[in-house]
Amino acid sequence: MREKIIDITQFFSNDLKSRSVARELRDMIINEKSTRVKINFDSVTFVTRSFMDEFYNVIVTNKNFDIELINFSPEMEAMLDAVKSTQHKSKKTTEKKISGTDLKFSTISEANKYLEALSFL
């Protein structure tokens, strides 16, 4: 099994602040001919939630990648866990109850969606 180690700070900053960095890292992994890639976070000092969200969605959950994260700090692990906990949760749907002519919605967004769907022609 061929293995490749990517030292993330050799290609990007010590501060990983944007979604585009995660996408560029994904592209690097795709271009590797290795069957397994280790991503070394040793010199990374800061990651944003935006970076970690994109990193999770385009790299961690990608079934085509065999990835190992090395030197991943407890703070980065906590950020990744926070991102994971907010992904792919099913939206709570509430039943619209009609009592007479009253409609009840649990959120403004839900009411807006209902109103946008009405046809006034």
Image (cartoon, rainbow, N blue to C red):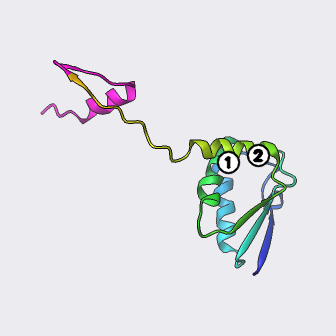
Tell me the residue that label 2 is attached to: 76
> What span is colored magenta in the figure?
99-121
- Looking at this view, name the residue that lies furthest to the right: 43
Quarter in which the N terminus is drawn: bottom right
Question: What residue lies at 60% left-to-right and 70% top-to-bottom?
Answer: 64
Question: What residue lies at 38% left-to-right and 25% top-to-bottom?
Answer: 106
Determine whether the residue tagged by mark 1 lies in a helix, strand or loop.
helix
Q: Nearer the viewer, residue 34 or 1?
A: 1
Does 20 appear in magenta?
no
Occupied quadrant, residue 42: bottom right
Question: What residue lies at 42% left-to-right and 36% top-to-bottom?
Answer: 92
Amino acid type of the residue tagged 2 in the rendering: Met
- Distance from label 1 to label 2 (Cα)? 8 Å
Position of residue 34 relative to residue 57, above or below, is below
**Residue 62 placement (x, y as % from top left):** 59, 63
Q: Nearer the viewer, residue 10 or 74?
A: 74
**Residue 114 placement (x, y as % from top left):** 28, 31
- Looking at this view, name the residue that lies furthest to the bottom: 1
